[in-house]
């Protein structure tokens, strides 16, 4: 895990996400309690914890995906990205989601060609120039380490790709609209070890350009890919620190019990 230390110990990396006293509920059921966290630019931050601890709910707060759930509501606090409160009344949620991309647990390619999956978001924005689209499609597929595998079948259905390729395609699709932040909710849970390794390599390379926040049940994965790790339990942020500290020398007994496998 030595590769994490240079980035994670750098003091000059700016905070891109700042969360203060954040509370969130589904109806009358409180899901998150008084969460405070700063997420640094161009690092990988992992959220770990047992099922139902609030980590995916918290992740979806960063691009307001929870807005799609009728009973979901903020009950206090703030989330700021680049200093702007993303729950302010003036916020354009569609614009927010251009800046904060999302990759889901189950790969969800559109029932279109590989090419059209990548070009879709650009066309929605009104970009029609074929040369521009061609360039972005290639750039994003290269960015997702897919170009060499699919360059000869760009106009075939994305649904014919393997599961691991589909997940990397979804990452490429998210990159096409040039987000600053990439959220990943259990991106490898449905993949075999070889495909998982490819996605992990990709995450490590992408942090040169993007801030990445990943939810994972796989603690070994968190240890491998992240610079910082946050441990959640029952809706509370128990501990948040440099990944090496969380796994080697945690300050909290609950964290130590979880990462050592005594519960969860």
Image: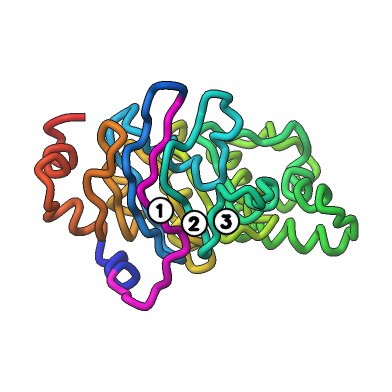
Residue located beneath label 3 in the image: 145
Q: Residue at x 40, y 42 (%)?
A: 215
- Which of the two discs, 1 and 3, labels the residue nearer the N terminus? 1
Q: Residue furthest right?
A: 129
Position above or below: 256 against 43:
above
Q: Nearer the viewer, residue 7 or 63?
A: 63
Q: CA distance from mark 3 to mark 2?
A: 31 Å
| Quadrant assignment, res 157 | top right
Q: What is the crowding at mark 2: few (fewer than 14 residues within 10 Å), some, or many (at least 20)?
A: some
Horizontal side of 90 relative to 119 (left or right) equals left
Q: Is label 1 in a helix, a strand or a loop?
A: strand
Residue labelled with disc 2: 80
State the separation of the CA atoms marked 1 and 2: 6 Å
- Give the CA separation, mark 1 to mark 3: 32 Å
* Label 1–label 2 contact, CB within 8 A: yes
Residue 247 visible? The answer is yes
Percent position of residue 93, x then y: 66, 46
Q: State left or right for residue 214 relative to residue 108.
A: left
Circle 1 residue: 19
- Near-viewer residue (19 or 153): 19
* Quarter of the picture holding the C terminus: top left
Q: Please rate how many residues cluster around mark 3, counting C-alpha atoms within 10 Å: few if below 14, some from 14 to 19, many from 20.
A: many
**Number of marks:** 3
Give the residue displayed 32% in from the left and 75% down from the top: 10
Does the magenta stretch mainly form a helix, a strand or a loop?
strand
Kind of element beneath mark 2: strand
Looking at the rendering, the stretch of residues picked out in magenta corresponds to 9-26
Q: Earlier in the sequence, mark 1 or mark 2?
A: 1
């Amino acid at each position: 895990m030595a590769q994490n230390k240079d980035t994670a110990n750098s003091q000059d990396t700016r905070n891109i996400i700042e969360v203060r006293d954040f509370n969130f509920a589904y109806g009358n059921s409180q899901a998150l309690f008084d969460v405070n966290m700063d997420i640094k630019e161009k690092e990988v931050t992992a959220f770990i914890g047992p099922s139902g601890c609030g980590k995916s709910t918290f992740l979806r707060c960063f691009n307001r995906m929870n807005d799609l759930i009728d009973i979901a509501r903020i009950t206090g606090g703030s989330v700021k990205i680049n200093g702007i409160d993303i729950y302010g009344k003036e916020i354009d949620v569609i614009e927010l989601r251009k800046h904060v991309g999302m990759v889901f647990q189950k790969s969800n390619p559109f029932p279109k060609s590989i090419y059209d999956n990548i070009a879709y978001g650009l066309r929605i924005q009104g970009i029609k120039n074929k040369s521009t689209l061609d360039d972005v499609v290639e750039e994003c597929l290269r960015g997702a380490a897919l170009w060499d595998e699919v360059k000869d079948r760009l106009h075939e259905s994305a649904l014919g790709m393997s599961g691991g390729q589909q997940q990397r395609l979804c990452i490429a699709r998210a990159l096409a609209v040039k987000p600053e932040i990439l959220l990943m909710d259990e991106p490898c849970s449905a993949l075999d070890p070889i495909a998982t390794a490819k996605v992990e390599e990709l995450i490590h390379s992408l942090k040169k350009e993007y801030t990445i926040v990943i939810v994972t049940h796989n603690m070994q994965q968190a240890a491998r890919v992240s610079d910082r790790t946050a441990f959640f339990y029952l809706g509370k942020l128990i501990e948040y620190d440099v990944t090496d500290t969380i796994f080697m020398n945690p300050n909290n007994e609950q964290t130590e019990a979880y990462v050592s496998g005594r519960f969860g």
